[in-house]
Image: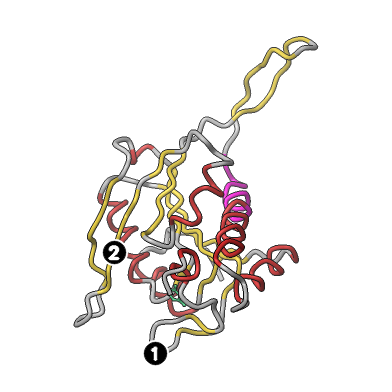
Amino acid sequence: MKNLHIMTHPLITHKVSMLRNIDTGTKDFREIVEELATLLFYEATRDVPLEETSIDTPNGTFPCKVSSVKFGIVPILRAGIGMVNGIHNMMPNAKVGHIGFYRDEKTLEAVEYFCKLPLDVKELDVFLIDPMLATGGTAIGAVDLLKKRGVKNIKFLCLISCPEGFENLQKVHPDVEVYTTSHDEYLNKAGYIIPGLGDAGDRMFGTK
Ligand code: URA
């Protein structure tokens, strides 16, 4: 599937299985989410352009390559927060924005309630992060907001995706590539991904 990058490395699959396990507690859950976020980011930055320059080393001046791309990390509240450090540790100069949505109980539409983005967000390559790509509603809303602010390059990083969410996102934003550690079977009527891992926010923050 164009634009869907599924990480199939055995260590990643092993860690996703640990997340799915109902007996994995909040501390381990949070740590694994961070580790997987780092690995997703590593994969999603494979195509970052490099520029030729030179650098002074202890052995003299040598040609080398560096990246001057400016990165933005934008978690979708609240569960996206659990993925931030795993990426920020790899790229400490990245700027971090936050976008919050709630689901309207009548219409079931995603409604924005918070948006704080870096002032220069349109110059950043943005990694939009949320552990679960379920209906796709919040992902679509968040990409809408970023595009309205002039962002051109957006990649969506999640831990678990499903066909419904991916297809909905692609219908509206076919330019957004999705990186996931597992593309699961389906979305149930309650909006949970099956088999999934339950409510990512609750498992991360111990709210249930
Ligand atoms: N959000 C979650 O936390 N889990 C799901 O399965 C779907 C959406």
The quadrant in which residue 103 appears is: bottom left
Residue drawn 69% across and 12% down?
Answer: 56
* Real-space Cα separation, disc 1 to disc 2, in angstroms: 20 Å
Identify the mark at residue 114; answer none if there is no mark.
none
SS at circle 1: loop
**Which residue is at the front of the view, 128 or 66?**
128
| Crowd tier of the residue under label 1, counting other residues whose Cα lies within 10 Å: few below 14, some 14–19, many 20 or above | few
Range covered by the magenta-colored residues? 39-48
Instruction: Report which residue position mark 2 lands on.
Output: 101
- Which image quadrant: the C terminus? bottom left
What residue appears at the point 50 percent right and 55 percent down from the top-left corner? 83
Q: Is residue 52 magenta?
A: no
Outermost residue to the bottom: 189
Q: Residue 120 at what x, y percent from top left?
A: 32, 35
Q: From what the image shows, is residue 146 above or below residue 67? A: below
Name the quadrant of the N terminus.
bottom right
Residue 104's spot in the image, x, y percent? 22, 75
Residue beneath disc 1: 189
Q: Name the side, left or right, on which 174 lies relative to 185.
A: left
The answer to which of marks 1 and 2 sits earlier in the sequence is: 2
From the viewer's perspective, is residue 113 above or below residue 14? above
Residue 45 is one of the magenta-drawn residues: yes
SS at circle 2: strand
Question: What type of secondary structure mainly makes up the magenta span?
Answer: helix
Left/right of residue 197 with respect to residue 148 in the rendered view: right
The residue under the point 49% across, 65% down is: 204
Q: Where is residue 200 in the image (x, y as percent from the top left)?
A: 48, 70
Q: Looking at the picture, which amino acid does disc 2 mark?
A: Phe
**76 relative to 167, above or below:** above
